[in-house]
Image: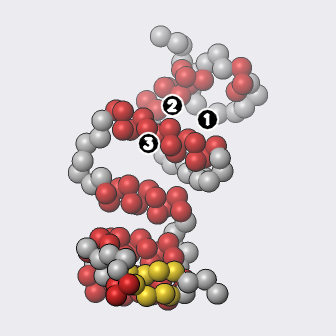
Amino acid sequence: MVFHKHRMMPGHMGGTYDPSNVVLLTVEEHAEAHKKLYEEHGYWQDKLAWHGLSGLKNHGEIHSAVSREANLGRKQSQETLQKKSNTMKKLISEGKLKRPSNKGMPRSEEWRKKVSIAMMGNSHNLGKKYNMIKVEKA
């Protein structure tokens, strides 16, 4: 049986890994402990821990939610955004993260034009059908 170390007072509330603050729990018990903490205190960290441990969200969903919550209201530099983009591309290429599906998302006419222009002259896309309009390169 696999056990997790669970801090009774979580790190985001100032808890440490001091032995007096740590208990060993099964994965199910660990998920339930974070659910109770979330219901009692309302911290997003506990909600994500509960959802991740119980399988309600996958690794990619948890990662995205943590990034959103941790950066709420903060502007990021182009350098930071580029580093994050490169990291995501690397995780996707290594098969550690799935590319999100955009199927069924409505697309604006402006988006379609930009994609059409970007796709022109790309021989690796020959034979593929795209639901886009034809425009002349500027």
Dot 1, crowdedness within 10 Å: few (<14), some or many (≥20)? few
Quarter where residue 66 is shown:
bottom left
Dot 3, crowdedness within 10 Å: few (<14), some or many (≥20)? few
Circle 1 residue = 131
**What mark, if any, has residue 84 been given in the picture?**
3
In this rendering, the label closer to the viewer, 1 or 3: 3
Compute the Cα span from label 1 to label 3.
30 Å
Local secondary structure at mark 1 = loop
Choose the circle earlier in sequence order: 2 or 1.
2
In this rendering, the label closer to the viewer, 3 or 2: 3
Q: Amino acid at mark 1?
A: Asn
Compute the Cα span from label 2 to label 1.
8 Å
The quarter of the image holding the N terminus is: bottom right
Circle 2 residue = 112
Task: From this view, report whether residue 135 is shown above or below residue 51.
Answer: above
State the image coordinates of residue 16 (x, y, percent, origin top left): 32, 75
Residue at horizontal 71 percent and vertical 20 percent from the top: 123
Nearer the observer, 88 or 26: 26
Local secondary structure at mark 3 = helix
Quarter where residue 80 is shown:
top left
